[in-house]
């Protein structure tokens, strides 16, 4: 009996010991191999899935795949064709083009700080970043392909096989492809805008920017939805864009009329470089966005009660836009670590 108890304790200790070394490894790798990938001090920690911790090998493979045009049926487009760093991993099209110049149905969202999103796409139908990769791969207007054929196409590529073995200890297959892509995307962290430096006491905002911040928190109450360090509460809201929505938003997923015209609240980080705005790219600039909120939007039974005429003056509209521009992180937008080679 005694014997069994002690060997049980021994096993337990071994398990704890292994767990410790594992997380130590992860931490060391973060520090040692990639100094640009540091979680901003005022950001929460990232929850990595147990089978997809960050390692430099995984990250490198993910980055290569992110810019790999062979993922699309016609070898024309990569993830990076629509998600471009200079535009905060979005682009400046109303809707972007996939294979054979087919137009997407929605405006491309920014991937900055995507590690923190609790679900993906604008209606929130995809539960993990790993699974999200399958959406563009299958989508008729994006890669129009499938993961099995991608696996077959990349099979003969020695470079990929080596990277895959180093990263996940197995040949390149669907398991590896979706995990590596997610591993890379989780490193796309943006937290060094003027606003962050102001919050950390390292910079100051001018009068107009400060006034804009106060409006954001107060009279305009943008904070009701665009809250927290990433300027979104990730809720699904109808912000009064239309009386009749062509894209029904979250109702596509739930089939519930209560969700008609509701979309995931987007982050406002780097918004100054992601024009045009909204799920359909219907607003050309930030002034138009703020004017929309100031007018209270279109009548709709699902419209949030926070969307109502705000009574902002021209100067206040301008101040609010000036504040939104303080959320631009130029260091992130120019970080060569995230671009193609
Ligand atoms: C043709 C343009 C295009 C390509 C190529 C593309 N995307 Fe996207 N991406 C979009 C659009 C548009 C959406 C919004 C989809 C929606 O809401 O239904 C999106 C959404 C996303 C999201 C979810 C963002 C959010 O806020 O929920 C992630 C993550 C993403 N894409 C990653 C990728 C990856 C990884 C690839 C390559 C495997 C890729 N994208 C290829 C246009 C593209
Ligand atoms: C009731 C919640 C809510 C409030 C309050 C709110 N927003 Fe939004 N905001 C949203 C939603 C939802 C979207 C996305 C709508 C869509 O995709 O069509 C959005 C989109 C945006 C966008 C476009 C982002 C992009 O990448 O397309 C900007 C900019 C924006 N809001 C700024 C503001 C400002 C400034 C205020 C305050 C005046 C504000 N919002 C108040 C919910 C809200």
Image (spheres, grey):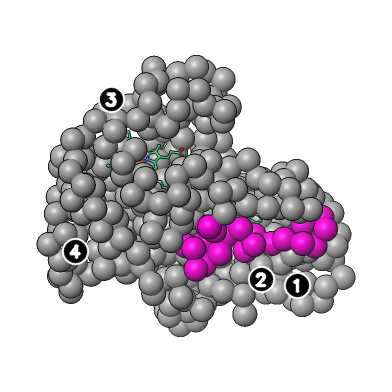
Specify the quadrant of the image occupied by residue 271. Answer: bottom left
Task: Give residue 331's quadrant in the image.
Answer: bottom left
Is 156 or 52 nearer to us in this picture? 156
- CA–CA distance between discs 3 and 4? 30 Å
Q: Residue at x 15, y 66 (%)?
A: 206
* SS for callout 4: helix
> Nearer the observer, disc 3 or disc 2?
3
Tell me if residue 43 can be seen.
yes
Q: CA distance from mark 2 to mark 4?
A: 35 Å
- In the image, what residue occupies the spot 52% across and 77% down? 337
Is there CB contact under 8 Å for labels 3 and 4?
no
**Residue 270 marker:** none
Give the answer, above or below, for where 276 lies relative to 224.
below
Mark number, residue 64: 2
Mark 2 and mark 1: Cα distance apart in space = 9 Å
Q: Tag 1 or tag 2, which sits nearer the N-term?
A: 2
* 151 over 338 or under it: above or below: above
Label 4: which residue? 199
Other residues around mark 3 within 10 Å, as few (<14) / some (14–19) / many (≥20): few
The residue tagged 3 is 305
Compared across the picture, whether 94 is left or right of 323 comes to right
**Residues rendered magenta in the picture:** 71-92
Q: Are marks 2 and 1 in contact (CB under 8 Å)?
A: yes
Q: N-terminal of the two: label 1 or label 3? A: 1
Of all residues, the one furthest to the front in this rendering is: 314
Mark seen at residue 160: 1
């Amino acid at each position: 009996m005694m014997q069994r108890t002690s060997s049980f304790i021994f096993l337990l200790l071994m398990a704890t010991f292994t767990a410790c070394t594992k997380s130590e490894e992860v931490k060391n790798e973060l520090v040692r191999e990639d100094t640009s990938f540091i979680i901003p001090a005022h950001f929460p920690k990232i929850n990595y899935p147990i089978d997809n911790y960050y390692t430099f090998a995984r990250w490198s493979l993910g980055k290569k795949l992110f810019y790999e045009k062979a993922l699309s049926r016609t070898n024309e487009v990569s993830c990076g064709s629509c998600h471009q760093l200079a535009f905060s991993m979005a682009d400046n099209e109303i809707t972007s083009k996939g294979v054979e110049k087919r137009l997407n149905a929605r405006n491309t969202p920014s991937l900055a700080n995507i590690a923190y999103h609790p679900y993906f796409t604008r209606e929130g139908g995809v539960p993990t970043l790993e699974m999200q990769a399958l959406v563009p791969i299958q989508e008729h207007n994006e890669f129009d392909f499938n993961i099995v054929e991608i696996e077959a196409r990349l099979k003969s590529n020695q470079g990929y096989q080596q990277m895959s073995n180093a990263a996940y200890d197995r040949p390149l297959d669907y398991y590896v492809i979706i995990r590596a892509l997610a591993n890379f995307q989780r490193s796309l962290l943006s937290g060094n805008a003027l606003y962050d430096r102001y919050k950390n006491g390292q910079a100051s905002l001018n009068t107009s920017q400060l006034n804009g911040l106060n409006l954001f928190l107060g009279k305009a109450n943008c904070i009701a939805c665009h809250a927290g360090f990433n300027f979104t509460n990730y809720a699904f809201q109808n912000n009064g864009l239309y009386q009749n929505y062509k894209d029904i938003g979250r109702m596509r997923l739930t089939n519930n009329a209560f969700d008609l015209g509701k979309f995931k609240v987007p982050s406002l980080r780097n918004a100054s470089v992601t024009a045009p705005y909204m799920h359909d790219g219907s607003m050309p600039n930030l002034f138009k966005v703020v004017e929309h909120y100031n007018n209270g939007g279109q009548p709709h039974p699902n419209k949030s009660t926070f969307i109502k005429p705000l009574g902002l003056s021209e100067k206040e509209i301008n101040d609010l836009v000036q504040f939104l521009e303080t959320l631009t992180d130029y260091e992130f937008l120019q970080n060569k670590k995230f671009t193609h080679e």
